[in-house]
Amino acid sequence: MYKSGFISVIGRPNVGKSTLINKIIGQKIAIMSDKPQTTRSRIQCILTQDDAQFIFLDTPGIHKPKFKLGEYMLKAAEGTLKEVDAIFFVIDATEKFGGGEKYILERLSATDKPTILAINKIDLLEREKILPIISEYSARYKFAAVVPISAADGENVSELLEEAKKFLPEGPKYYPSDMVTDQPERLIISEIIREKILHVTEDEVPHSVAVDIEEISTRKNKTTYIRAVIYVERDSQKGILIGKGGALLKGVGQNSRPEIEMLLGRKVFLDLWVKVKRSWRNSDGALQSFGFGDK
């Protein structure tokens, strides 16, 4: 009997959801950063095994929104709870239970989906501290299973998948065996560039950044030309992102290019531009142009 189904991966920002997805898939699909709210959209990733196919929805971290962009992210995250066969609720073992976790448990109470608690970052914790965490969360919600994991080094990730497999219905392969995401190349490229920006900019810039791929074309020498426009909200942010003599922007391009070439399997000329689109995070029109919100 072949099984296939959809699993939503939810949790507060920065608990390691994208790291877990990438570890499961075996390559980087979801971007990772030490800054919260890195994932902005539902990124669909696929793992195919001999007896099952898992389709994961890596969702934005559930948080109190401050902008229309945040409202979209919250809607995207919560919307998956109704569409899936099972849920991974990922928590950070090094953080205490708080309002964010309480809010998520309230949302879970409104669903009838089996939820597996993934207690992440156990590699950063003394082992005797794990059992009290299990006890605290189990007293607050009836989980289908509880699995302590380290998404960073892969500890117990296979056990997490085995638990999830129990709740997948009998079904077909929805995607070819070698397919790991249904996201278009343009989106993955823009996310790679945004990740590199997150790594090199300070707190003022990261959440004000959007990346739009304006052109992908093949040049005479078989090189793929990619023109990407990086949007920020203020002139000062533009200056920060370009850097002295264009050094920071050049670094973003140098760091992005190898991953994009690996994705496409060919040489890439990456042409980066920075433009200001004021208050785009609160503009319905801008959000739609960047692929957020309702079309």
Image (tube, helix red, strand yellow):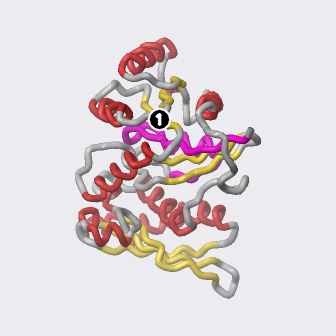
Q: Is residue 7 magenta?
A: yes
**Closer-to-camera residue (171/247):** 171
Q: Is residue 147 shown above or below 103?
A: above
Compared with 134, 71 (above or below) is below
- Toward the bottom, the furthest residue is 220
Residue beneath the point at 53% across and 24% down: 145
Image height check: is 71 above or below 151? below
Residue 18 image point, x, y percent: 50, 45
Label 1: which secondary element:
loop
Residue that appears at 46% across and 24% down:
143
Residue 10, quarter of picture: top left
Residue identified by numbered label 1: 113
- Judge left or right: residue 198 versus residue 258: left
Q: Nearer the viewer, residue 150 or 157?
A: 157
- Name of the residue lying farthest toward the right: 50
State the quadrant of the C terminus.
bottom left
Task: Please state the extent of the stretch shown in magenta in the rendering.
Answer: 2-30
Residue 130 lies in the magenta-colored region: no
Relative to residue 222, is residue 230 depicted above or below?
above
Q: Tell me if mark 1 has few (under 14), some (14-19) or many (20+) residues whose alpha carbon lies within 10 angstroms of its own.
A: some
Q: Which sits in the foreground, 59 or 253?
A: 59
Regarding residue 154, the answer to whether it shows in the image is: no
- Amino acid carrying mark 1 in the image: Lys
Q: Is residue 289 left or right of residue 1?
A: left
**Which image quarter is the N terminus in?**
top right
Image location (x, y in percent) of residue 89 = 45, 34
